[in-house]
Image (cartoon, rainbow, N blue to C red):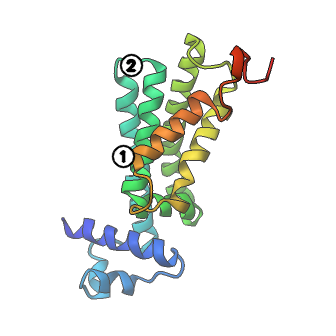
Amino acid sequence: MSKEAEIREAAMRIFREKGYHAASMQEIANAVGMQKGSLYYYISSKQELLFKIFEEAIGSMARELEAIYARPLSPREKLREAIAAHVRAISQRLDMLSIFLRETRVLSPGQEEVIDIHRLRYERLLQRIVSDGMKSGEFRALDPKLTTYALLGMTNWIYRWYNPSGRFASEQIADIFTDLIFNGLLAPAAGGRDREGR
């Protein structure tokens, strides 16, 4: 691991444990065995360090979603892959994604603009998968943007409760979420009736 990566890893852990505002550059320096002044050879400020963490988090997720969208899959298969990738990203990078989902507003306007470009790219690509499925008839004709926000709300909230040593592995969580999205919560009605009881 490069020294820059080691610093980011330590910062992610400390930012998540203490919150961005409570964390200090001295604590980050101590975590990587450096003098505080030596940190500034690699990073100009705590805010820039946070920005780099954010850019890596959302940038890598957007690139993975682009790769999924480019594959010769049906919208249903792409959405299944997208949900699995999103859950996996949060569970495997819990420190990074927790900070990203919690601390975005501390960035400068210029930094926020860069992150928003990545975030919108991700949201629009996920929305395109949803829209493609609606156009093909695989998905119900709902509002694509609202549906996308519902998907993101459900998957993003993992950062608040996911436990790597808990009852469910990330793959199992992704499967349950996918089943909820595709099939809903209501059990199939008896005697061939639909879910509204008609």
Residue found at x 69% / y 14%: 192
Quadrant in which residue 73 is drawn: top left
Quarter where residue 48 is shown: bottom left
On the image, the x and y values in percent for residue 173 come to: 47, 46
Residue 187 visible? The answer is: yes
Give the residue pinned by disc 2.
73
Instruction: Residue 60: give its label.
Output: 1
Looking at the picture, tell me which residue is in the foreground, 54 or 141: 141
In screen coordinates, is 195 left or right of 42? right
The residue that appears at 26% across and 80% down in the rendered structure is: 32
Q: Nearer the viewer, residue 31 or 39?
A: 31
Sequence-first disc among 2 and 1: 1
Residue at (54, 18) in percent of width and height: 132
Q: Which three-letter amino acid code belongs to the residue tagged 1?
A: Ser
Q: Is residue 85 above or below residue 197?
A: below
Q: Quadrant of the C terminus?
A: top right
Q: Position of residue 129 (x, y in %)?
A: 51, 25
Query: Badges 2 and 1: C-beta atoms under 8 Å apart?
Result: no
